[in-house]
Amino acid sequence: MKKKVLVALIMIAIIIPILLLGGIYFNISIFLISALAYKEIIDLEYDSKELPWLIKILGLGCFEYIIFGNNSLKDPSIFPLIIAILILLIPIIFYSDFKKYNTNDAFYLLGNIIFLGLCFNFLTNIYHYSLKYFLLMLIITIFTDTFAQIFGMLIGKHKLTKISPNKTIEGSLCGTVLATFIASMYYINVISINENYFEVILLIALLSVISQLGDLLFSAIKRQYNKKDFSNIIPAHGGILDRIDSILFITLLFVVLINFI
């Protein structure tokens, strides 16, 4: 536990300057983090089978293009998605050995590249749209996860789901309640004081629940492949996707709220 806390503090010390500097420093960080996430999702499926190196490179290129090829939250372009579909499906025709690359491989890559690519794209664009909103997402996900773990250990008795046996209903509820309170205070005092408080609290609570569902979704992915973590790149924490699963998933609803509320 001490090692986990120490590593978390080191990560915070690295992340804060990057968020404050922004610009190219933030974009480079997102590029590196997303590239590592891409490797984790590829390694998850192809632990025993080796994909052709050209397909891996094309997949990474499509992935990063989806992330950085659209810089609008309110009028997103589907052009990067179309390019990814074409680039990853057409090579099937030219691989005579379907054991190397086939339709299953292509659709596995496409599904993950589009899903994770959009999440990273939204994450990046939310940051450029408003640092205050980006910090709100961080507050919701970090405090939801932290309080859910703490109260799960202290008072948790009823298992939340078989997918993640350490999570409890009591911890989940406490995590949502306390994170909603802290995030609501942040929103009201930092972002806007002229808001319908009930609506703010309700939406933040919904985002907190979504962040936990994101965590469970990525846990389900790992369980399907009998993996505890996506990788061991971060000591005591696992992989990149183990750390940012909640915030990636929360971006999907966050973008909806920004566009329609």
Image (tube, rainbow, N blue to C red):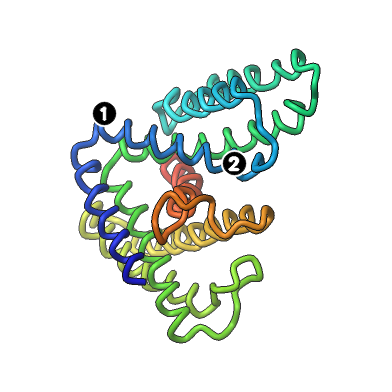
Residue 40 in percent (x, y) is at 53, 43
Furthest residue to the top? Answer: 94
- Please give left or right for residue 139 compared with residue 162 in the image: left
Query: Do the numbered discs 2 and 1 sit on residues whose CB atoms are within 8 Å?
Result: no
- Please give left or right for residue 176 compared with residue 136 in the image: right
Q: Residues within 10 Å of mark 2 (few under 14, many from 20)?
A: some
Residue at 29% x, 53% y is 11
In this rendering, the answer to whether 194 lies above or below 146 is above
- Numbered disc 2: secondary structure: helix
Residue at 19% x, 37% y is 21
Residue 136 in percent (x, y) is at 32, 54
The answer to whether residue 261 is visible is no
- Please give left or right for residue 91 compared with residue 165 in the image: right
Quarter of the image that includes the N terminus: bottom left
Residue 211 image label: none
Determine the image quadrant of residue 165. Answer: bottom right
**What is the three-letter code of the residue carrying label 1?**
Ile
Query: Which residue is under mark 2?
Result: 43
**What is the three-letter code of the residue carrying label 2?**
Asp
Query: Which residue is under mark 1?
Result: 24
Residue 109 in percent (x, y) is at 64, 33
The answer to whether residue 18 is visible is yes
Residue at 40% x, 77% y is 150
Give me the C-alpha separation between circle 2 and circle 1: 28 Å
Q: Judge by depth and name the residue closer to the eye, 25 or 142.
A: 25
Q: Nearer the viewer, mark 2 or mark 1?
A: 2
In this rendering, the answer to whether 134 lies above or below 145 is above
Determine the image quadrant of residue 30. Answer: top left
